[in-house]
């Protein structure tokens, strides 16, 4: 069974699917957005409490690193769980092919019948596909899995790590490199532009409403800055 499954996976694994690519990009967009808002939250809290630029920089940098590694580890754990679930489903279908092949053929036939194909044609399609690659056919039809194309937790982790680090860098640079006179407006502008960009990218990747995503992200960014600024002033 293992040999047949490995051979089938090797044949199927030729290039990344769109779902695999989108998963990596999704992790990057979420990491970037989280990096921006987390870092600016700390920067505003600390900057509202002290004017010491070194203290502000160290606090922002520490949070940036912590956020980046936290996002990466979270993505790795989440996508690893998804991958394990997919591989478990494939192993289960491989066993069913050995013990009850006819029922698997019937499941494929039913899949095409439910999509308007005649029973005779559905049976012919099912038999032909099962003859070519039974395991790949079954897991695609029953579990919506493309054999050999499991989500890669390392891709998601590194994408989130670098994106969160890059996203958090914009408000950190604005707050620490600009003069005291300009650091607040520069940071606010940097955050608004950054979250607007991540909103745009997330909408494009998810085929959502671009304008809505941008407005939502900008509002969340402004609220985040507002809350953390006044929290910092309390102390």
Image: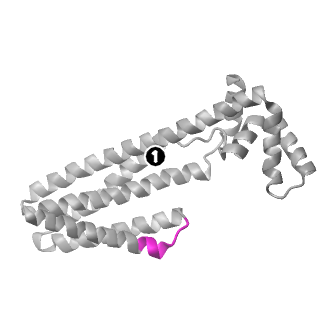
Q: Magenta stretch containing residue 208, yes or no?
A: yes
Taking the spot 80% from the left edge, 57% from the top edge, the residue there is 115
Residue that mark 1 sits on: 156
Residue in the picture at 27% in, 57% down:
38
* x and y, in percent, of residue 183 in the image: 16, 69
Magenta region's main secondary structure? helix
The answer to which quarter of the image holds residue 127 is top right
User: What residue is at 86 percent from the left and 46 percent from the top?
Assistant: 125
The relative height of residue 40 versus residue 163 in the rendered view (above or below) is below
Q: In the rendered structure, which segment of residues is drawn in magenta?
A: 207-214
Magenta region includes residue 25: no
Quarter of the rendering occupied by the N terminus: top right
Q: Where, quadrant-wise, is the C terminus in this rendering?
A: bottom left
- Residue 229 vs residue 164: left or right? left
Q: Position of residue 168 (x, y in %)?
A: 29, 57
In this rendering, position of residue 25 left or right of residue 36: right
Work out whether residue 172 can be spotted.
Answer: no
SS for callout 1: helix
| Mark 1: few/some/many CA within 10 Å (<14, 14-19, 20+) | many
Residue 48, placed above or below residue 135: below
Horizontally, is 60 left or right of 124 in the view? left
Residue 205 x/y as whole percent: 52, 62
């Amino acid at each position: 069974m293992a040999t047949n499954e490995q051979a089938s996976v090797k044949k199927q694994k030729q290039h990344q699917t769109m779902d695999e690519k989108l998963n990596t990009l999704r992790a990057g967009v979420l990491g970037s957005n989280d990096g921006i808002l987390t870092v600016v939250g700390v920067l505003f809290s600390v900057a509202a409490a002290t004017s010491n630029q070194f203290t502000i920089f160290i606090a922002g940098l520490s949070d940036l690193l912590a956020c980046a590694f936290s996002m990466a580890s979270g993505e790795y754990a989440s996508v690893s769980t998804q991958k394990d679930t997919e591989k478990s489903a494939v192993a289960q279908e491989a066993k069913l092919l050995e013990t009850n092949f006819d029922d698997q053929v019937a499941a494929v036939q039913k899949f095409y019948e439910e999509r308007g194909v005649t029973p005779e044609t559905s049976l012919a399609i099912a038999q032909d596909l099962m003859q070519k690659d039974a395991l790949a056919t079954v897991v695609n039809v029953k579990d919506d899995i493309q054999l050999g194309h499991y989500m890669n937790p390392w891709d998601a982790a590194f994408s989130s790590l670098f994106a969160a680090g890059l996203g958090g860098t914009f408000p950190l640079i604005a707050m620490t490199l600009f003069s005291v006179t300009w650091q607040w407006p520069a940071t606010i502008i940097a955050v608004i532009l950054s979250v607007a960009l991540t909103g745009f990218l997330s909408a494009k990747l998810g085929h959502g409403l671009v304008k809505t995503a941008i407005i939502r992200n900008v509002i969340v960014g402004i609220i985040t800055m507002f809350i953390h600024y006044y929290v910092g002033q309390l102390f």
